[in-house]
Image: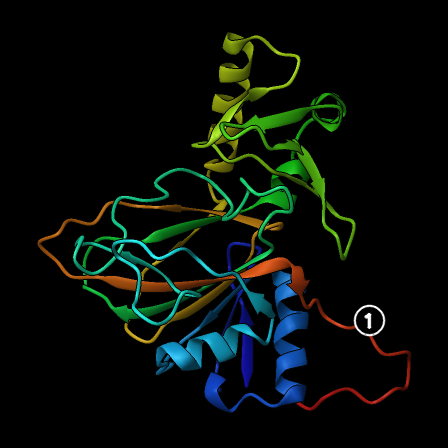
Amino acid sequence: MQLTPLAVGFGATIEGMDLRQADAGTAELLRAALLEYGLLVIRGQSLTPRDQVLATNVFGKPEVFPTMRGQLSGWPEIFRVASRAEDGHVDVGRYWHSDGSFREDPTPISFWYSEVQSEEGGDTLFTDLQQAYAELQPDIQEEFDTLSTAHRNGVVHPLVLRHPKTGTRALYLNIGLTAGVLGYSADHSKALMAAVDRHYSRPDATYVHHWLPGDVVVADNLHVAHKATPITPSTRRILNRTTVRADGVIWSNPAPEAGAPRPAP
């Protein structure tokens, strides 16, 4: 198993492993890497729906989705994103967001498997929410630290969220589903959200993932946000997504004390 940090400053690629054969030591290494880098890109996998659900269990208990058009029959844990309606859900997430932010307890981890991928279109963009907060001017940080946002379904979250495992602050704003900032007028809320949207997209802050067949991408939704880009029905693409429940997440164990043995890579 070889881990290489991405040049953008967050995230890492992992090569030389088969998720179907991950043992306890490998699982712990994956959890530790996700906690450190926020995003894992694992190439060359071959996963059945059952394999994907089992691999998701490395990070915690999967969420279950209601039966609806586009879902994969017999696998309620898998939310299918596709370029064609007969294959899954289309035209979703084309704005900066973290999956499951509309929940009272936000979805901590998302896991995508590229089942069918065209050579053109449908890239996914990722940005580091912790670095986005760190790069704000101190007076803006102080303002944002006091604010909360309301989703369209009424769920309220702080605009600056502390990671439940590391305590690191991160901007946390779903650009598409947020109704407004509590205590701010509609115009003020709109202006703030537009400014955050631009900040997420600032130069050199985005990792662009071009999907290849067999790709797995795992994201810590409290560390990074993502954004879909357009893909037309003229080309066929299917991403199978599983997500981890907030009450079932498994973060990395505490680092061993000095001199204690570590799992071999």
Instruction: State the residue at coordinates (49%, 49%).
Output: 99
Q: Quadrant of the N terminus?
A: bottom right
Q: Quadrant of the C terminus?
A: bottom right
Would you name the residue on which mark 1 appears?
Answer: 254
Q: Position of residue 68 (x, y in %)?
A: 31, 54
Amino acid under label 1?
A: Pro
**From this viewpoint, is residue 38 visible?**
no
Instruction: State the residue at coordinates (60%, 90%).
Output: 23
30 displayed left or right of 99: right
Q: Position of residue 82 (x, y in %)?
A: 25, 57
**Number of residue marks:** 1
Q: Is residue 240 above or below residue 188?
A: below
Along the line of sight, which residue is nearer the eye, 37 or 98?
A: 98
Quarter-of-image position of residue 192 = top right
74 displayed left or right of 140: left
Along the line of sight, which residue is nearer the eye, 82 or 102?
A: 102
Q: Is residue 94 above or below residue 11?
A: above
Q: Is residue 41 above or below residue 131?
A: below
Q: Label 1: few (<14), some or many (≥20) within 10 Å?
A: few
Instruction: State the residue at coordinates (77%, 55%).
Output: 166
* Circle 1: element type: loop
Residue farthest to the right, as pictured:
258
How was this image coloured? rainbow
Q: Is residue 200 above or below residue 110?
A: above
Quarter-of-image position of residue 117 = bottom left
Quarter-of-image position of residue 81 = bottom left
Instruction: State the residue at coordinates (65%, 72%).
Output: 31
Q: Position of residue 264 (x, y in %)?
A: 69, 91
254 displayed left or right of 210: right
Q: Position of residue 184 (x, y in %)?
A: 62, 11
**From this viewpoint, is residue 261 visible?**
yes
